Amino acid sequence: MSGVISDRCKVPQAFWHAIAHAGLPPAAVLRQARLPATLHLNAQALVSTEQYFALWKAIEQLTPEPGLGIKLVTQADTATHPPSLLAAFHARDYRDGLQRIARFKRLCTPEKLHIAEDGAECIVTSEWLYSTEPEPAITTDVAFATLLELARRSTGQHLTPRRVEFIRAGPKHDVYREYFGCTIRYGASRNALVLKSADLDRPFASHNPELLEMLTPALAAALGEFDARSSIRVQVKVVLKRCLASGRPELPDVARDLGMSERTLQRRITDEGATFRDLLAEARQELWRRLLSDPAAGNDEVACLLGYQDPSSFYRAFRDWEGVTPNRWREMNSTRPAAEPT
């Protein structure tokens, strides 16, 4: 695993054009999401994962239309896509296109695309590295529809997945079955787009070697610069936050996740003037601040998600870090305004 992006999501102008085309004024969406009213005027706007999810939740609340995410994707003009996605539409075949999206997605969002082939199936799932809550349903719809449109528009064939799995229990609408053309499983343990492995070798009629020759080096260079800036401290803390709920992660676990030896990981942590124990404490501190900002999360639940076996250990650690109890911290921070993107 190479460097991981910081908790910043790009909001391209194509996003605002798409929702406006669907009858949603950007100003209304931003107001509902409690984000700066002029965010859509900034072509270089960056938001956190939490704020990015808030945008999509606002869209769901303002237009509770079944399949809206699919509509936004199918009505979008491929030419308006950012270079990281545009390159995928001109790839050699479907497999190449998916791999290009997975490789360059980190330039836009802290989302990791997992592509796993297992016999006749290719299972595509995504992981939001900084999320402490499930992604909005419409975000999943947009992601899956984008990957399917990649295949359909580029091959010129109406390809269908083997099945689609949704964590959501419902409501169940015909629009999903009609669009995907396959079995839809609700109440699943994951959100997954399950493709037919045989479809991955289908060539793209839109394959454009000349365009790829121009786009790929620029994207690779941007990714290289990003990886070079990504410190091991950031990478380790992302892994730790993801694993805390299942127990206290140890250095071998993190090294395995990052694809390096324990010795290499230890050396790189030391080179940055830190210790593994320091990073574990920092990861917990950063994560509990985010979790405690959610009034719906109880203190005991937060303690569990942070890997503490009993709440009292969490309370002691919290007081050592913050100097107050979790409840007092919540009182002190309950009126803090939402942070504006930088």
Image (cartoon, rainbow, N blue to C red):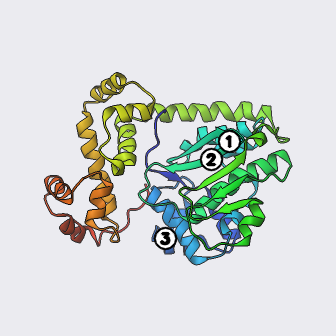
- In the rendering, at what x and y percent does residue 127 appear? 51, 49
Secondary structure state at the residue bearing disc 2: strand
Which of marks 3 and 2 precedes in the sequence? 3
Q: Are marks 2 and 3 in contact (CB under 8 Å)?
A: no
Q: Are marks 2 and 1 in contact (CB under 8 Å)?
A: yes
Q: Is residue 167 above or below residue 217?
A: below
- Quadrant including the C terminus: bottom left
The mark found on residue 98 in the picture is: 1
Foreground mark, 1 or 3, reads 1
The mark found on residue 33 in the picture is: 3
Residue 75 visible, this angle: no
Secondary structure state at the residue bearing disc 3: helix
Q: What residue is at 56 percent from the left and 35 percent from the top? A: 222
Q: Nearer the viewer, residue 331 or 190?
A: 190
Q: Residues within 10 Å of mark 3 (few under 14, many from 20)?
A: many
> Marks 1 and 3, how far apart in space?
31 Å
Q: Residues within 10 Å of mark 2 (few under 14, many from 20)?
A: some
The residue beneath circle 2 is 124
**In the picture provided, is 21 more to the left or to the right than 263?**
right
